[in-house]
Image (cartoon, rainbow, N blue to C red):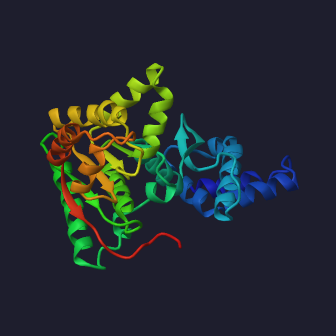
Amino acid sequence: MKNLSDELKNTLKKPKYNKTYKEIVNSVLNDVTIKQFIKDHSNELNDSSVNHSMSKLFEFVKENNKLKNNEATTIPGFEPILVVNNGMIDISYVPTNEQKEKIKLKKIKKRITTVSIPKSIRDAGINDFDYKENNSRILAMRRISLFIRDYDESPKKWHQGTFLTGRFGVGKTFLMGSMANELAKKGHLVSFIHFPTFVEEMKKMISNDGFFKSVDSIKKSPILIIDDIGSESMSSWVRDNILGIIMDFRMQNTLPTFFTSNLTMDEFEEFLSENNKGDEEPLQAKRIMQRVRFLSKEVEIGGRNRRPQ
């Protein structure tokens, strides 16, 4: 079988080709990737088709060299590959491995709806959680890991969530963030809200449809994480018309629900029983807590304060 690259080089020895053009073509044809491509597709190409494809080959070499030298390419995030199209050599641009990872990560992030969650938490990985410090962290990690496994195997079954309680800075939110990311990687939708901020946003929306749409979206989320609950200013209206509505719907539809709080469940019930005006409303608080206790199991997590001092 004829070597098309050699044939083309012989053609270029003819006087009608100037020196500069010959040098460019020779450098292109000596490119390792191009030589191999021509060899692999010798049954589809001839010296004329290769010659007429020279501009595409030159473009390939130019863009490929930019990638090798970590220079900006014409189409950032994409790399050229050679293809045969109707007997001619053409270029197709495909995502680089780095771009594929970015696209994959973007798809994962789209599965998580967040409200005022720090970037460090949104990027948390399950393997980054320091669980070896004490037994409470080991038990918390085990419970979360089992939930991820069990939910992924049977998302339509009822899976109880967790009420993660502990002191400031021990990593409650981080563990929830890592769980959210692991679930998103597996294709599951998660809502992760910082409850005090969510409440303030809802107060601003009370006079328009945004309030009902936001509460409706959160209450119906397949998996819901309510972060830092119990640190907000709790009015009767917030308790009954935001938290109560969300808890009612999720209990009735057995939707997995998680909480992080500096309060224990008993302390949270006491917190709910007194509104911001100082009025005692224990029955309303008990009603909410029946739903919270149904939806989640209390798990205490200890350890050192990991927040910057």
Q: Is residue 28 left or right of residue 293?
A: right
- Is residue 165 placed above or below 42 in the rendered structure? below
Q: Is residue 207 left or right of residue 82?
A: left
Name the image quarter holding residue 53.
top right
The residue lying toward the viewer, choosing from 82 and 22, is 82
- Is residue 72 placed above or below 139 in the rendered structure? above
Name the image quarter holding residue 249.
top left
Image point (80%, 58%), residue name: 23
The residue lying toward the viewer, choosing from 145 and 28, is 145
Q: Is residue 145 visible?
A: no
For this orientation, the residue located farthest to the top is: 208
Image point (22%, 76%), residue name: 135
Q: Is residue 168 visible?
A: yes
The residue lying toward the viewer, choosing from 182 and 115, is 115
Q: Is residue 267 left or right of residue 184?
A: left
For this orientation, the residue located farthest to the bottom is: 133
Residue 27 placement (x, y as % from top left) = 73, 60
Residue 290 placement (x, y as % from top left) = 15, 43
The residue lying toward the viewer, choosing from 15 and 250, is 250
| Count of marks overlaid on the render | 0
Residue 20 placement (x, y as % from top left) = 86, 55
Image point (22%, 40%), residue name: 288
Image point (27%, 71%), residue name: 137
Residue 297 placement (x, y as % from top left) = 17, 55
